[in-house]
Image: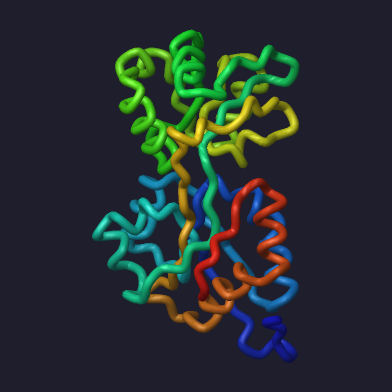
Amino acid sequence: MIALTGNQNVVELRLLAGGAMTNVWADLKPQFEQTSGHKLEIFFGTTPNLIKEATSDKPFDVGVVPIDVMKDAAARAKFVADPTIDIAYVGLGVAVRCGATKPQIGTVEALKATLLGAQSIASIPESAAGYSIARVFDRLGITAPMQAKMKAQPNPAQVVAVVAKGEVELGVFLINVLTAPDLDVVGPFPDELQENVVFTAAVASQSNEAAAARALIAYLKSPAAVAVIRAKGMIPSRSEP
């Protein structure tokens, strides 16, 4: 699809990426590199980390980030003014350690009771998913008691790890992250409370490799990439590059 002739025009792209897509990029990175000949250096982070990185003096070429990053004016100014291209989205869910009893979360009241009854909850409050979860807590009227239960983690992998080890009772985060070998997914949030986190793409305004950056975004809309995104528990977005 993007194959190059010889080594002409082969570049290295620096990509800023949402940490919840780490498992997706584990497959997409080698596929894109093999298909295009380009190389990817990926910086993974939460929304605050990505805003900080985008607005630092360190150069980058392209972002595939939670849409909340683009709501920060300083970060948005670091990308081209064209509309961003939505790549994928995913909703919130709950998971427990493998073999643990699965609580009831199928209705609004059941989820509320489960959250209030939990001894501890692993999540990343300072992230796009964390902001969504906080809004759900607010709608349920349980913000204060949840603060005492929340065990903040630095990245998605650590959310999985502490629940898998039994150090924290519940994982509450994006459901694709919770779909891990050492966890049992209880299920998604009820439809009435569900909030999807959208991951959107744009070329950096100061990139010297804009053509290759656009090629990466186009690749993310290809059937091969869409299949990986879907297989990793995310829903491919329909917007066109």
Q: Which of 172 and 43 is in front in this view?
A: 172
The residue positioned 66% from the left and 28% from the top of the image is 185
- Give x and y (percent) for residue 16: 48, 59
Residue situated in front as seen by the camera: 239 or 18: 239
Report the side of 165 relative to 92 (left or right). right
Q: Nearer the viewer, residue 166 or 133?
A: 133
Q: In this view, does 160 lie above or below 83?
A: above
Colouring method of the image: rainbow
Q: Position of residue 224 (x, y in %)?
A: 72, 67
166 vs 135: above or below = above
Measuring 35% from the left and 13% from the top, which residue is drawn there? 145
Above or below 126: residue 29: below
Relative side of 34 to 115, left or right: right
**Residue 120 vs residue 220: left or right?**
left
**Location of residue 225 in the rendering, given as x and y in whole percent from the top left corner:** 68, 64
Residue at image coords 74%, 90%: 6
Farthest-out residue, left: 73
Residue at (31, 60) in percent of width and height: 75
Give the quarter of the figure containing the N terminus.
Answer: bottom right
